[in-house]
Image (tube, rainbow, N blue to C red):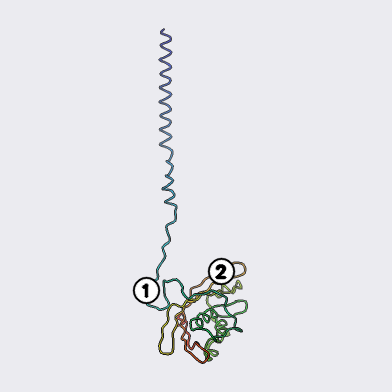
Amino acid sequence: MRSTRFILILTGLVAVIALLTTGIVYAVNRTTQPEAPDATAAMAETAAPPSATPTEPDTGRAWETTAPPTTASSSPVPSTRKLDRKGMSADELVTTAAQVMTTWDTTTDVSPTDGYRRALPLFVAEYRDIFVTPAKPALPRDWWEAAEREASSTPRVQITDTYAHGDTTTYYVVASWTWRSEDGWTLTPDPAHMTFQVTQDKTGPIIRNWTDQQLQ
């Protein structure tokens, strides 16, 4: 009887020691291992915040606008052989002129003036002596980069405002373009801000004056 009681007591002590040892090991492992992050919190931390659409400051300049383009186009530009202002509205005249003036192929054009000259059928005759390609043109930086890759430009034009005064209407235009090369390279420089003054002659609307605001 004593031996049986001794064996039962010994067995109980071994079981208690085993439970205590297991508890101690579990406690040690829990304090040394970092807790796994909550899945919801991790997703919240890695999710990109919603992009904020910046708004341009109201400077009062007629060609600056935050509205989406209402008169914009990146359609193929008519060639100079087919460029005829007969039957064009004043808006079409200005849009076409700005498109042609910002469409270039650096494999054949040596400066932006080459594009300007292609738009001459839409201007008064005096501009034939104004749009003259210089022998040593001062080219913008984006033109040099595009020329290195033999790129051509695709324009996009937006009329942002108009101002009528007598028989003349002034158009404020933002013209942007993207250079593209055959190997997939692209570059979109800062847009140009232009003004066109349009009058009427026997054929229809005609551009009598043009300015590029960056050049003033």
Residue density around tag 1, few if under 14, some if 14–19, many if 20 or more, within 10 Å: few
Give how far across and how far down residue 126 sits, in percent: 52, 91
Residue at position x 40%, y 79% from top? 62
Q: Nearer the viewer, residue 188 or 143?
A: 188
Q: Which quadrant is the C terminus positioned in? A: bottom left
Residue density around tag 2, few if under 14, some if 14–19, many if 20 or more, within 10 Å: some
Check disc 2 and report its element: helix, strand or loop: strand
Q: What numbered label is drawn on residue 27?
A: none
Check disc 1 and report its element: helix, strand or loop: loop
Give how far across and how far down residue 73 sits, in percent: 52, 75
Measured along the vertical axis of the image, is residue 52 above or below residue 42? Answer: below
Locate residue 84 relative to residue 55 in the image: left or right. right
Q: Amino acid at mark 1?
A: Asp
Q: What numbered label is drawn on residue 58?
A: 1
Q: Amino acid at mark 2?
A: Thr
Give how far across and how far down residue 167 sits, in percent: 43, 90
Q: What numbered label is drawn on residue 186?
A: 2
Q: Nearer the viewer, residue 60 or 5?
A: 60
Q: Which residue, as the protein is rendered here, is positioned at the far front?
A: 87
Give how far across and how far down residue 144 sits, in percent: 56, 75
Calculate the distance from the C-alpha at mark 1 to the C-alpha at mark 2.
30 Å
